Amino acid sequence: MENIKDRILKFFRLDEIMDNLSGYVEARVGLIKVEIREEVSGILSRGLMIMIFFLVGFMCCLFLSIGLANYLNTRLESEFAGYMIIALFFGLLLCLLLVFRKSFFKMIGKQFAELIKQRHQ
């Protein structure tokens, strides 16, 4: 029975087709793995760069705020008025963000959607 099966496979060259097909599938799977690795590494590197930019931006904003508060303290001849003015400014900014958070999130969502659309074109 095995002999007949082997003869039929050899006659129709199905064994070579099966070998070629399995080689093609293995190569395709390998290519997909490489593409996934590249995509993940790209996403991670972009994420890391964004985190670094936010950290540097935060530190810049922090030290500028402290410097501005100290400057206001010397101009107003007070020990705390400059810090209170800066805190009030950031408190108002926080309130604005809370009030307009839905439209703010929609705007950010649209920006990310456009970014993703551009990335995959």
Image (cartoon, rainbow, N blue to C red):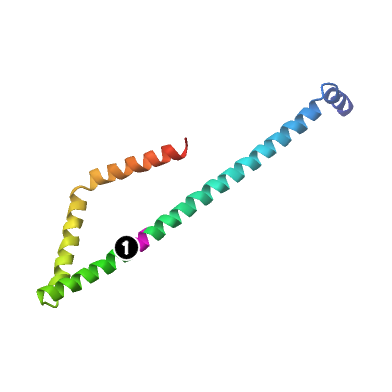
Quarter holding residue 57: bottom left
Quarter holding residue 13: top right
Q: Mark 1 points at which residue?
A: 58
Give the x, y percent position of residue 107.
28, 42
- Identify which residue, 97 or 114, lies in the foreground: 114
Report the residue at 24% width, 44% height from top: 102
Quarter holding residue 105: top left
Give the x, y percent position of residue 7.
87, 24
Give the x, y percent position of residue 41.
53, 51
Report the residue at 23% width, 71% height from top: 67
Give the x, y percent position of residue 106.
28, 42
Report the residue at 18% width, 49% height from top: 99
Q: Which amino acid does label 1 sit on?
A: Phe
User: Is 56 one of the magenta-colored residues?
Assistant: yes
- Identify which residue, 20 or 82, lies in the foreground: 82
Q: Is the magenta stretch mostly helix, strand or loop?
A: helix
- Span of residues in magenta: 54-58
